[in-house]
Image (spheres, rainbow, N blue to C red):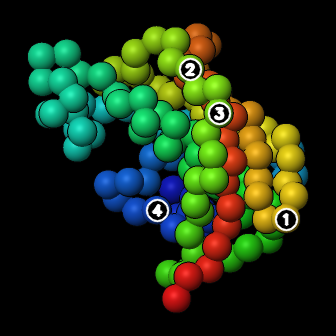
Amino acid sequence: MDIKDIMRHLPHRYPFLLVDRVLEMELGSRISAIKNVTMNEPFFPGHFPHHPVMPGVLIIEALAQAAGILAFATAGEAVNENSVIYFVGIDNARFKRPVVPGDQLRLQASITKNMRGIWKFSAQALVDGQLASEAELMCTLRTVE
């Protein structure tokens, strides 16, 4: 799935769209996507100028966006200007290594539960096969006016 397809499945846009490509997706089960981390990211000048590191909250957000693509596609939901994905919870978030410019984040998420519109995912972000971050994410899809 390229960026055009991703934008059909996510309401996020620049500078907050954090998924560049979907490599694999098994509806109802799992997704594997990538985020190319470059020095041109808008957060690097402030985090940190002398030692640029991708903020952990944005790694979690990238994981949630990958999970959101899987949820929207699995539910057969069309994304429009009234579509949003809200976090419901983030559990057991851990950060194992810094993510820096030049890294490619491999975003992996698996559905562990979907009940009453709440989606729960097990998610991991890897760089060169090494675990950079992991978390259990809970999200819900909503239509707003």
Secondary structure under tag 1 reads loop
Tag of residue 12: 4
29 sits to left or right of 51: right
**Foreground tag (4 vs 3):** 3
111 above or below 124?
below
Counting from the top left corner in percent of width and height, residue 73 is at 75, 62
- The answer for how far apart the CA atoms under marks 2 and 4 are is 24 Å
Residue at image coords 61%, 39%: 90
Q: Which residue is mark 3?
A: 91
- The answer for how far apart the CA atoms under marks 4 and 3 are is 23 Å
Residue at image coords 34%, 58%: 14
Secondary structure under tag 2 reads strand
Tag of residue 94: 2
Q: Could you tell me if the residues under marks 2 and 3 are in contact, i.e. CB atoms within 8 Å?
A: no
Counting from the top left corner in percent of width and height, residue 6 is at 57, 59
Q: Is residue 110 visible?
A: yes
138 sits to left or right of 101: right
Q: Could you tell me if the residues under marks 1 and 2 are in contact, i.e. CB atoms within 8 Å?
A: no
- The answer for how far apart the CA atoms under marks 2 and 3 are is 9 Å
Few, some or many C-alpha atoms within 10 Å of disc 1 (few <14, some 14-19, many ≥20)? few
Secondary structure under tag 4 reads loop
Few, some or many C-alpha atoms within 10 Å of disc 2 (few <14, some 14-19, many ≥20)? some
Please tell me which of labels 1 and 3 falls first in the chain.
3
42 sits to left or right of 13: left
The quadrant holding residue 78 is bottom right
Please tell me which of labels 4 and 1 falls first in the chain.
4
Q: Could you tell me if the residues under marks 2 and 4 are in contact, i.e. CB atoms within 8 Å?
A: no
Tag of residue 116: 1
Q: Amino acid at mark 3?
A: Asp
Q: Amino acid at mark 4?
A: His
Please tell me which of labels 4 and 3 falls first in the chain.
4
